[in-house]
Amino acid sequence: MANSVSQDVISTILANPSPDSSSDLPEIIVQVLDLKLTGNRYTFNASDGKMKLRAIFPSNMSSDIMTGSVQNKGLVKILDYTLNDIPNKSEKYLIVTKCEVVSSALETEIKTGEPDIVLKKPKLEHEVKSEANIDFAGIVLKPKQEMVSKSAAQIVHEQRENMAPLARMAMTRRVHPLVSLNPYQGNWTIKVRLTSKGNMRTYKNARGEGCVFNVELTDEDGTQIQATMFNEAARKFYEKFQLGKVYYISRGTLKVANKQFKTVKNDYEMTLNDNSVVEEASEEETFIPETKFNFVPIDQLGPYVNGRELVDIIGVVQSVTAVSNIKRKIDNENIPKRDMIVADETKKTVVVSLWNELANNVGQELFNLADKSPIVAIKSLKVSDFQGVSLSTLGKSTVVINPDVSEAKKLRSWYDSEGKGSSMANIGMGLSPSRSGARSMYTDRVSLSDITGNQSLGDEKPAFFSIKAFVSLIRPEQAMWYRGCKTCNKKVTQAIGSGYWCEGCQKNDEECNLRYIMVSKISDTRGEAWVSSFNEEAEKIVGCSAEELDKLKSELGDIDGYQQKLKEATWIPHLFRVSVTQNEYNNEKRQRITVRAVAPIDFAEESRYLLEDIKKMRGSH
């Protein structure tokens, strides 16, 4: 019947609380009543006109509800579900894992003349047995049959043994998509690929010592979830989990994800214990999960700097360096690294560092394609404040060249028509002194004496601070710039014959750029210090490029003009973001302070900062 519910469908659901893929169930169409948002999920009463059952929509239906596709008093067709008892709730809940819209809101609630019954969960176990044959409006509910605990692999194997070859191929075990999982579900089985595996770590707290490791799991739809294993479970599954393999997993638990530590976009995180079941899907058809991206425009990377959250980007490759080796301080191991510059429609560029296998494999492919300006999409990048803002790959990062996504087609069209001839600026040059975001010029504010008075700063790892100071001296006799490659900015040497040789790019170029590497003294009300500034930061301090300053000094021979230009750059207030490290010189450790970002004073924002500082001082007395 058009625009109507399926007859007695609630009783069908009750008789089949967790149907498998081979269940021959009738069409399940119910009316949505009392639709409302509960927590981060939408709940409703599923009605067949006679009986009602509390139900929960899957999280991927939230957008359909918000846009009005799914409406209160509308009809939906349930394609897959699980019937659960939820702790601390009196009702049974129908967990809808897959459904589709049949009709928008009807004028009235559908009723067949029978009394409405909203099923409740029995409170005691003996009541279940005594009410096994209770009659609800002519519907007989049978007690749930006792199940013998078997793994998914055992059940499928037993069923397949008695089936014809073609039927065996068609037979698949029932798996739940990751998007359908929630902490209230009972038994579930998922089929996932291991896309990231962390190292085994040890910890020590008030309860004792232990070990832990994390994995990231991705299903066929591209949905991800993080799973954690402690102690016995960690030791049991660490060797079993191999990167890239596909597994069936069951008997895990879920809880709301801790946003401070989660690395994937999922409301929940999984814990596997010693009783959890992990089976490799070695003899069955595996899958390559769809890579889902959540792109962040390059000009919006600032708030992510030095934060825990990883980002995905898409851009046009401007240049790629040759691979180099960086010696790791902990064990002196040489780690392959390759840098590339990527731009997008915001007309900003950013340096992306590829490490380890990515530097050798996909990095070499990008190096060979660099002159064709390929589109690259990268998932799970760490954002640091090196060179203002820069990106680095991790073990879990994924790099896709010329991806088949709409954003890539749009970017290619823009670059070919407009972007290729546009002037691009490094994202690190556009830093704002805004107090919003993780990378504010007003966070970690100290005076210079706080840095110079603590000679142990930066001993183990770089320390970062913000300072308000004046440039008090720039020595005019210093070598203020170097000749850099126009592609990778690394230092070049005079080539035999003509031009300049770049060791990083392994090529000759007729021209090069002059890039600042300047040392200056900065001063504030409590002290002074010598700092190093590189090209973008030095340009903001001096007020012109190294090429312009060199022209003034060398080509025009105007030494007085050159010195006057440097003098004009002094005693102007700036906000500095600096890093502090330890360098060893003649067996003596010395502080090295490097300017990572420079911004002009925003006097309105500075006034607000000072007022808040005054309030704090008053509150402390």
Image: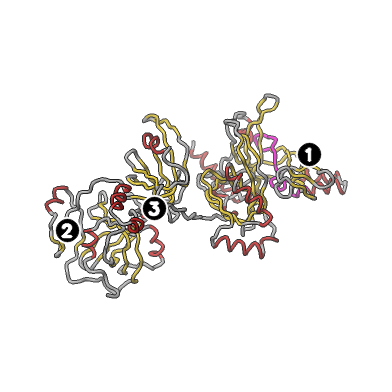
Q: Residues within 10 Å of mark 2 (few under 14, many from 20)?
A: some
Q: Residue at x 47, y 37 (%)?
A: 199
* Viewer-closest of 419 and 24: 24
Residue linked to disc 3? 178
Residue 314 seen in the current view? yes
Number of the front mark, 1 or 2: 2
Q: Secondary structure at mark 3?
A: helix
Q: Residues within 10 Å of mark 3 (few under 14, many from 20)?
A: many
Residue 184 seen in the current view? no
Whether residue 508 is situated above or below residue 31 in the rendered picture: above
Residue most extreme to the right:
557
Q: Secondary structure at mark 2?
A: loop
* Viewer-closest of 167 and 379: 167
Q: Residue at x 47, y 40 (%)?
A: 198
Number of the front mark, 1 or 3: 3
Residue linked to disc 2? 141
Residue linked to disc 1? 479
Q: Amino acid at mark 2?
A: Leu
Identify the image quadrant of residue 62: bottom left
Asked if the magenta segment contains residue 545, the reply would be yes
Residue 341 appears left or right of 249: right
Whether residue 10 is situated above or below residue 437 in the rendered picture: below
Q: Amino acid at mark 3?
A: Leu
Image quadrant occupied by the N terminus = bottom left
Q: CA distance from mark 1 to mark 3?
A: 59 Å
Residue bounds of the magenta highlight:
523-546
Pinpoint residue 480: horizontal percent, then vertical percent: 77, 41
Q: Are marks 1 and 3 in contact (CB under 8 Å)?
A: no
Q: Residue at x 17, y 54 (%)?
A: 143
Q: CA distance from mark 1 to mark 2?
A: 89 Å
Pinpoint residue 101: horizontal percent, then vertical percent: 35, 68
